[in-house]
Amino acid sequence: MKVAQFLFLILPCALIVSFIGNEQSDDLYFEIKEIRDGEGLLDRYETYIRTPVCEDDKCYLVEIMFFWDLMGRYVGYDTIPGQQLTKLDHIPFTSEDYQKLDRLLKDSASPIGKYSKEELIKDTRESEVDGFSGATIQEVKEQVVSGGVYSCHTLWHIAHSGEVIDSLKNWTKASLTKPFVKKLVKLDDQELNYFLINSFKDEEFDLYLPEVILMMKQAEGYFVKNTIEAIPSNVIHDSLSQTYFASEFKKLNYFSQVALLKKLKPNNLILEMKDVLHGELSEKNSIKNKLIHNLID
Amino acid sequence: MGKHKHNGTLVCVRSFNATPMMLMAVLLLTASLSNSYAQEVLLEAESFDEKGGWFIDQQSMDVMGSPYLIAHGIGTPVADATTTVRFPKKGTYYVYVRTRNWTALWSDKAAGQFQLLVDGKPVPKTFGVSSKNWNWIPGGKIKINDVNTTVALRDLTGFDGRCDAIYFTQDKNSPPPNDIDEMDDMRVRLLGLDTSPKTDRYDFVVIGGGMAGTCAAISAARLGVKVALVQNRPVLGGNNSSEVRVHLGARINLQPYPALGNLVNEIGPSRGGNAQPKDYYEDDKKLKAVLAEENISLFLNHHANQVEMERDKIVKVYAENLETGEKIGFEAPLFADCTGDGTIGFLAGAEYMSGRESRSTFNEPTAPEVADNLTMGISVQWFSEKMDTPIGFPDIDWGLPWSEDKSFAITRGDWDWETGMGKDMVRETEFIRDYGLLVVFSNWSFLKNKYSRKEEFSSERLKWVAYIGGKRESRRLIGDYILTENDITGQNFLSDGTAPSSWTIDLHYPDEENKEKFNGAAFRSIAKHIKIYPYPIPFRCLYSKNVNNLMMAGRDISVSHVALGTVRLMRTGGMMGEVVGMAASVCKEHNATPRQLYENHFSELEVLMEQGVGNPDLEKIQNYNLGATLLESERKL
C-alpha cells in the first residue's frame, strides 16, 4: 500500500498543518486551524481541503471542511457553499451520498484503512491470501460512494491520518494550562482523561491535583489504579491527596487500593489514613493485608 | 509415534500409527479361554494400522461407546483404511460392522457409504445405508483362507461414512451386543484390555489441551510442578487448532494483571481469521511449547472418561487411548478440568449448570424471563478455493431440499454457520455436527449444480469443511462464586480477581429468518453484544465448590450463561489457564486445595499473577480480533 506523505507546519493562533499527500504524484496540501471558545481556550480544529482526485484518468475537484476534536478525533465535515462534491463524470453527490460519506468518515475502524486505492478495485479474490475475505472488500465497497471511491478513500485517510492525530494531540498537549485542564476535565471523556495523566509531567501533578482528583471521582474501570500509579510519591503524600484517599478508600476497588498501598510510605501517613488502614485489616491472606501491615505495624 | 524425553524416562506422545504389539492386543482367541465362546475377532476401526484417508472421531464416544473412523473426503472418496487381522483359524465367519447412516434422520438416501474388503474382496453388503442409529449391521458370510488376512474399509462417497468396529464370528447366531455396557465388556474380553491399568503419579493433571489446558500445563510446569496434559485429539489448541479453525479472540496484558497473557502471546498464532488455511493455526507452535517443558508429560489422543473418588476428592483420572482402547491412570493431588464440556467435573459429581438461567436466578437483565435449555451452538466452518479449471461436485440426493432463496452464494462459512442451539451440547454432539455438515454440503451441491449463476462457482473447490465442531457452551461447573452479568457491568471488582475478561458479553442466537426457512432448525446465527470494561474473573470461579481438588479453566468455569458470553473467548481462557497453573504451584507448595489457597495463601497467587509465566520480552503479536471494550485508552507505561 502506498503511504501518503505528510508534512506539518505549526503556527500559533492559526495552527497550520501542511499536509502533502503523494497519491499518484498529486501533492495534497492543507492547513489546519485551531478554533477557540469564548474564553479563549482551545476548542477544536478545522481545515479546508481542496484537492483534485483522479479516477480512471478523469479528475475532479474535492473541496470540503474537516473538523477534529482536541484529541485529534475526526468529528465531521461541512460542504463549501456553492461547491458540491462530485463523482465520476462530474455527477453531483446526492443527499444519500453525503450521508454515506458521513457514515464512512465517522467509522474510524473502517476496513478502508487497511487498503490502498488500487486494492479496493482489484479482483477481490486476490486479497484472500492476507487473511481478509473477498467479502471484506465487498463490505468496503458498500461503505463508499459509488463513482467516488477514490475521494472517499482520500478523505478517510486524511480524517484518520495517524500523523494528523499525533500532531493535533501534541498541539493540545503543548497548550495545557490550568484553565484549559479545568475545561477538559469537565468533558468527562475517558480517552481525554487518560491523555491528561499521560501528558502531565511529574512536577505538574501537584499543580493539577484538584483536577486529577476530579477525574478519579468520575472515573470507571482502571483509571483510578492507573492514576495512582502515575502520581509521584511526594504528591500522593500531599495532605490534600491523602485526605481524599483516606475518605474514599473504602469506595476504591481492590486493585486501586493495592496500587495506593504500594505507593504509600509508613513515615508519611496522616492520622486519618492510618485509621482507615487499621479498619481495613482482615484475616484474609492477601497482598492488601500484607501491604497494610508493612505500613502500620 | 513420537517420544518425549522426560526425567530420564521416555513418555509416549501418542500419535498416529498402531504398533504390532497393539494389533496383537486387538485379537484374541477366546476359544482358548472358554469353550462356550465361538471363534471370534473384534476389530476396532480406530486401531487399523493404516488409516488411509479416514480420521478418528472421538467427539461422541461417551455417548455411542467408542471412537470411530470417519471418511471425511468432502465429496471425494478417501483412501482405504487397512489392517492385517490374525484370525484364530481358517474357515467361515459371519461379519458384523458397527456403523450408521448419518443422513437417515433427514433423507431416505445415504450419504456416507463404504465397503468392507476382506482379503481384497468386498463383502456382499454396502455399509452406512441402513440404520439411523449406531448398530451392528450383518455383512454376510465370508470364507477366511489365511489366518493372516487383510481387512480394509473402502469409502464409496467421500461424505462422512463411519465405522466403529468390525466383528467376525463363526457362530451363525451370535450378533454382538448393542448395549454400551455389554459392548464395553466385550471389548475388554476380546481386546485383552487391562482392567487394572497402569497408573502414573503427577503433581497436577490437566485434562483438555485447548488454549486453557495448554496454558495451564505450561504455566504450572514452569513453576516446578510435574504435570500430565491429557488431550483427546492428535493436536493441541482445541477450537484454535487447525481441526476447528476459530481464531483467538479478546485481549491480553490488561489491568489489573498486565503480565497475564504473556504465555498466550507466546503460543498463540500470529495471524487471525476464521476458516482459513491450516497453517494459520500453528498447531506445531503449541505442541513445541509443550514439548519444551521438561515437567510436562503429554498424552495426545487420550480421552479421559473415568474418575476414581475418595470422598470429595478425585484420586485418579483414567484416560483411554483412542487407537488401542488401553487405559492409563493419572494419580494426583490436584486436577484441572479444561475439557470445555466439564467432563471431569461431571464424572466426579461436581455441581454444574447448563442452558440459560431465568432472570430472577441472578437478577440479570439479559437473562430470559424463564429458564430454558438454549445454549450457544456448534460451528461447522468451511471454505472453498478457486482452481484454474472448472471442477465438479456431486449433485447429492440426500441433502435437504434446497432452492435459490435458501442458498448462500458464498465461498466461506464463518463462525455464524452455527447450529444446535437448544440441543444437548454433550449428548447430541454427533447430531449437531452432522446437521452442520448436511447444510454445508446441501448448499454447496446446489451452488455447483443447480444455482442460476452456477458458472460463478464452476472453478471453486470445496477445500475444507470442519468435522470437529467448534463448541461454545456446555456444562458450567459451579465454584465458590458464580460470576454474573451484574458483576461485570457493575464493575464489581472482587479482591480475588484474576484473568481479565474483555470481550463483549457476546451471546449467540439462531437467525430467525434462517430458522423459519429450515423448519425450526437454524444453522445460521446472530450475535448480540454488550461492551464491558475488562473484568478480572474471581479465582473462586476457577475451582469446584464440591469437588475439593478440581480447578477449571476455559468455558466450563463458574459463570452464569450471560457471563459466559464474555469469558468464553480463547485468549481469556488461555489466561485462566495461566492462573490455574500458577495456583497449582501454590497448592503444591502448601499441600493445599484451591479453596485453602483462596483462604490462606492468596497473596502468593497475586504475586505470581503480577510476575506472569510467559516470556515478557517477545514481540506482542496477539493484535487481531481484540474486540471492542469500554476501555479504549490506557496509561502509557
Image (cartoon, rainbow, N blue to C red):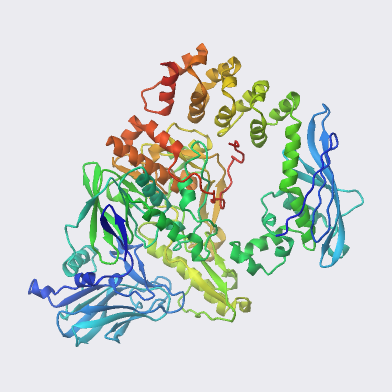
Give the mark count.
Answer: 0
Task: State the quadrant of the N terminus of chain A.
Answer: bottom right
Q: Is residue B567 visible?
A: no
Residue B140 sits in which quadrant?
Answer: bottom left
Of residues B469 and B450, the one nearer the viewer is B469
Q: Is residue B3 left or right of residue A224?
A: left
Looking at the rendering, in which quadrant would you find the C terminus of chain A? Answer: top left
Residue at (67, 63) in percent of width and height: A138
Q: Where in the figure is residue B263, as x and y percent of width and height? A: 45, 47
Image position, residue B507 (x, y; %): 51, 50
Residue A192 lies, in percent from the top left, at 67, 35
Q: Give the residue drawn at x 30%, y 36%.
A: B589
Q: Is residue B512 left or right of residue B71?
A: right
B49 above or below B380? below
Which residue is at a point 38% across and 43% down the rendered structure image?
A: B580
The percent position of residue A228, horizontal first and vertical second, equals 56, 27
Question: In the rendered image, which quarter is residue B96 located in?
Answer: bottom left
**For residue A39, side relative to residue B493 (left or right):** right
